[in-house]
Image (tube, rainbow, N blue to C red):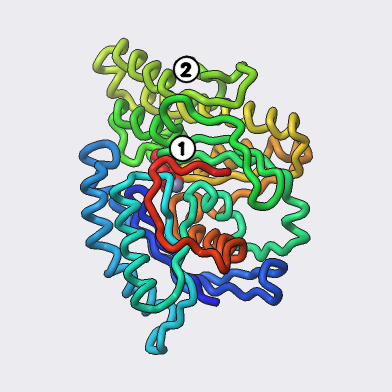
Amino acid sequence: MNILGIETSCDDTGISIIKCKAKNEKRKAIFEVLSNIVSSQTKIHAQYGGVYPMLAKREHEKNLPIVYKTVLKKSFGQKNPQLDLIAVTNGPGLEPCLWQGINFAKKLSKQLKIPAIPVNHIEAHIFANFISKAKNEKRKAKMFPAIALIVSGGHTQLILIKKFGKYKILGETLDDAAGECFDKTARVLGLSYPGGPAIEACASKAKNRGPSSVGLPRPMINQKNYNFSFSGLKTAVLYHYQSQSPKIQKSPEYVRAMAHEIQNAAIDVFLAKTFKAAQEYRVKSIILGGGVTANSQLRKRFKQQAKKSKIKLFVPDKKYSTDNAVMVAITGYFNWLKTKEKIPKSIEAKANLRLK
Ligand code: KG4
Ligand code: ZN
């Protein structure tokens, strides 16, 4: 079956078409990506240093029909398009943006006479790990129970996956998401938007890769719970920056050392909490997802620690760590298997949708 995925939860308009070859449905699902387009709005939001929801909504409305036409052409060329299911993100995310994708999905569903199914964006980030490799039941059995760390511009959650599709949120950020912290501190340091990739690039040029003289806090690293907090880190960066002379503030060495320390502070906390949870719940694997996990240093340190701890680590390709619609289409497939006869009649945007 061919599945159309639609993602508009934040500032990326994503549409993809995947072909799902499944001999006996769940057992050996193999996904082939026929087309995948992410139309990014970063240039538009850069001037605000963050996503401006009503602008994002307007851009989605403008982009959706154009991107849809392009993915159809890429997937089917001159042939008649054949689509069997539509999967659309209905939360969590920015409500006006979610509605754009949902309304587009509903219109297509009517027009093509095919079902549309809602997808949780966080679950989609988890399922991004099923994209490149065909994962059959055997593999899934080896994967679960698992701990998933999902870190993006809007979310920071540590999730226990008891078995395929069964979730328990162990902890989450009490204030800012880690990606948001990268975006905001990058702005303080005069780096470009989005901040995550800018901080990574700048940090890689830092001379001293050892313990930093900047000394930022590792928020909540020693607390017994699995929650996170990143607003204190953001404030610490701001105060440190403001206490420097204008000459130092502008010096590349200072900015690089800061970027390096911000990145390390966040990674230290992620590593400590994730591996502690992995140990406590005796899981078979750790799963990463979300834009921040595109960070090379984060990937490297998780790989090293996983090897040491003899635990399997699943990380999506970088292009599938950040928002995309392939992960939405795949999640839609598994939702469809679960609900089939009971596909919800109406889909609603849920800004604070939570995994269950
Ligand atoms: O998952 P995502 O694409 O969108 C949301 O669901 O929010 O994540 C976007 C976030 C942004 O905050 C961006 O700065 C961060 O992911 N990000 C990174 C990197 N690439 C994107 N953070 C650190 N290092 C990166 N290489
Ligand atoms: Zn995301």
Q: Which quarter of the picture shows residue 16?
A: bottom left
Q: Note whether 285 is above or below 272 in the view shown.
A: below
In this figure, which residue is indicated by the disc labeled 1? Answer: 155
Q: Note whether 31 is above or below 161 in the view shown.
A: below
Residue at 28%, 52% in the rendered image: 41
Residue at 68%, 67% in the rendered image: 26
In this figure, which residue is indicated by the disc labeled 2? Answer: 216
Which comes before the other along the chain, label 2 or label 1?
1
* Position in image of residue 185 (x %, y %): 35, 27
Q: Pick whichever, 202 or 307, lies toward us.
A: 307
Q: Is residue 5 visible?
A: yes
Quadrant the C terminus occupies? top right
Establish whether ligand 1 lies closer than 8 Å to the Cβ of label 2. Answer: no
Residue at 47%, 61% in the rendered image: 344
Of badges 2 and 1, the one in the foreground is 1
Q: Which amino acid does label 1 sit on?
A: His
| Secondary element type, mark 2 | loop
Q: How crowded is mark 2: few (under 14 residues within 10 Å), some or many (20 or more)?
A: some
* Position in image of residue 244 (x %, y %): 31, 12
Q: Residues within 10 Å of mark 1 (few under 14, many from 20)?
A: many
* Position in image of residue 108 (x %, y %): 35, 72
Q: Pick whichever, 105 or 305, lies toward us.
A: 105
Query: In the image, is 329 to the left or to the right of 73?
Result: right
**Quadrant containing ligand 1:** top left
Q: Pick whichever, 199 or 291, lies toward us.
A: 291
Establish whether ligand 1 lies closer than 8 Å to the Cβ of label 1. Answer: yes
| Secondary element type, mark 1 | loop
User: Residue furthest toward the bottom?
Assistant: 79
